[in-house]
Image (tube, rainbow, N blue to C red):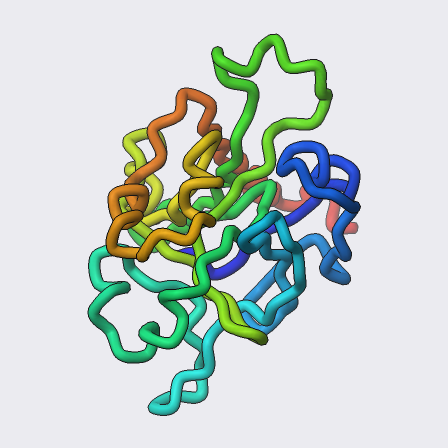
Amino acid sequence: MCSRFELNTTPRALARQFSLSAAPAMPNQPEIRPTDWALVIGSNAETSLRIWGIPAPWDGKPVFNTRAETVLEKPIFKPFLAKRCVITATMFPEWRKDGKARYRNEISRGWGVDEQDSPYIEPPIMAFAGLMDETHTTIITCAAAPRMAHVHGRMPVILAGDAVHTWLDDAPIEQRASLLTPYTGNDLMVVEETPPPPKQPDLFGT
């Protein structure tokens, strides 16, 4: 977790929600997987595209997630700690396991109680806490929020409101580690896809 996510929105909506000075360049497809381009926001509301995943010298697979509990300790992340960012997303999927069966769940933010009076028609865009260098980015994960703990034990750190600006400020990351906690907003939506019904036998032999 998280092994993919979606950014299915418009540049205008992104600029409006994150107070950007200009509409950002967008990834070339809504669904983003490791090694794809992801839209990140850095300090001073600067936007750019970064490759999702840090090359790992010991493995051919990129490190696209890092645990909040160990991010300050692992050597691979040391060069990234001074360059914090948020990775923008509208949804991420996770699979609930029930024996051998797996059920896809879509996790997103909806309209919470505090946002009912918003004049915008777009649902909030999620801001995942992340780290980046000049080319790559990685998502920081934490324990799952209670609303999705039945689906999976981990989730991206979702920042909202002033936490976005605080995460992107110039303070040392050690002073911002308290932000790396499960999301507690009442607007977290977890929607499980209904599996298709079993195929019925063809009684007429056609």
Q: Measuring 70% from the left and 44% from the top, which residue is drawn there?
A: 8
| Location of residue 27 by image quarter | bottom right
Residue furthest to the top in view is 117
Q: Measuring 45% from the left and 32% from the top, which residue is drawn there?
A: 162
Q: Nearer the viewer, residue 138 or 145?
A: 138
Q: In this view, does 202 lie above or below 123?
A: below
Residue 80 in picture, x, y percent from top left = 40, 70
Q: Which of 193 and 108 is in front in this view?
A: 108
Residue 81 in picture, x, y percent from top left = 36, 66
Residue furthest to the front in view is 170
Residue furthest to the bottom in view is 58
Horizontal side of 105 relative to 35 (left or right) equals left
Q: Measuring 61% from the left and 68% from the top, which residue is drawn there?
A: 50
Q: Which of 116 and 190 is in front in this view?
A: 116
Residue 12 in picture, x, y percent from top left = 79, 38
Q: Measuring 34% from the left and 63% from the top, which residue is drawn there?
A: 66
Horizontal side of 60 relative to 134 (left or right) equals left
Q: In this view, does 37 lie above or below 157?
A: below
Q: How many marks?
A: 0
Residue 6 in picture, x, y percent from top left = 62, 50
Q: Is residue 61 above or below residue 144?
A: below
* Quadrant (top left/top right/bottom left/bottom right) for the N terminus: bottom left
Horizontal side of 31 relative to 177 (left or right) equals right
| Location of residue 173 by image quarter | bottom left
